[in-house]
Amino acid sequence: MPTAHLTCSANTLRFADLPTRVSAAATAGFTGLGLRVADYLDADMADADIRDLLDRHGLRVLELEHTWDWGAGEDPVEATMFRLADRIGVRQLNVPMFAAHPLPDLVRPFAALCDRAAEHGLLVGFEFLPYSHVRKLSQAWEVVAAADRPNGGVILDLWHWFRSGAEPKDLVDIPASAITSLQLCDVLPDTGPDLADEARHRRLLPGQGAGDTLGVLGALHDRGIRVPASVEVFSDDLDALPAADAARLAYDAGAMALDRAKLNAPSWTTNLEEAR
């Protein structure tokens, strides 16, 4: 089985408690972990204990997620996110936009969020979702490009890529350095009537669905995009398995997809300058 530097997304083992998730991910071969702010708060552990838990298992936190309307300005939740980054180490914030703001009105708030995040050594990855208010890669890039911050970029989630109708040609005008990370998953052959419900319950393991995973990964390779990758599979079927089994299946599928595409995800650091 191929090996790769891969992160276990917060949503792949979304119902496992933090110690179980850390152990299962590390045993499966993951070197990184994704967390939601709720995971951090629900763990009810001291920051030092969380850091020790990660260190014992050789894991670092790649992605930190929380859904809030950052377009409306600074929010109290940021204090929690930045505290976690400072005390435990996080590479990037993953931010979508579900509130209704015209794209031009998101530029200044995104730039301001990037500036606040930079003070804590964080990248900010803007994630387009086909059921959100920023639905396409081109829209996310429009905001990121206009904000023009060195720590701001775009996340490529393959489920969102496939369901939004993105194509490799859409990458032509986006610098490779503007892509912050890659999230691996796959889609069912037929689009469901409710994209949000499908995205949160019926994703497939990378390379095991109807999406042209190898084609997209090949396009990323050709564009010189070399970014950290996570496996993000929201799946009721995966949720029903023991965490260790789900983690193993997720890691094996992600590593195999990268190996087949000859796209090796690099190791990464939480230091802002080295990360970019």
Image (cartoon, rainbow, N blue to C red):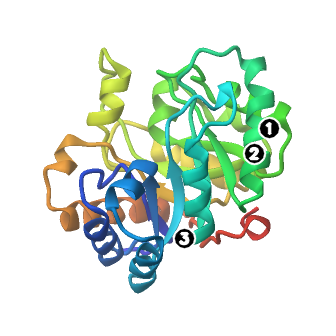
- Name the secondary structure under disc 3: helix
Look at the numbered discs 2 and 1 and tell me whether their residues touch, using CB distance below 8 Å.
Answer: yes
The amino acid type, in three-letter code, at marker 3 is Ile
* Residue located beneath label 3 in the image: 88
Quarter location, residue 169: top right
Q: Residue at x 73, y 32 (%)?
A: 141
| Place of residue 170 in the rendered image (x, y in percent of width and height, measured from the top left) | 69, 31
Q: Residue at x 75, y 45 (%)?
A: 114
Q: CA distance from mark 2 to mark 3?
A: 19 Å
* Residue located beneath label 2 in the image: 114
**Marks 3 and 1, the one that precedes in the sequence:** 3
Q: Residue at x 36, y 32 (%)?
A: 199
* Residue located beneath label 1 in the image: 111
| Place of residue 92 in the rendered image (x, y in percent of width and height, measured from the top left) | 62, 55
Q: Residue at x 55, y 43 (%)?
A: 77
Quarter location, residue 221: bottom right
Name the mark on residue 58: none
**Marks 2 and 3, the one that precedes in the sequence:** 3
User: Looking at the image, which is closer to me, 9 or 122?
Assistant: 122
- Can I make out residue 178 in this image? no
User: Looking at the image, which is closer to me, 207 or 237?
Assistant: 237
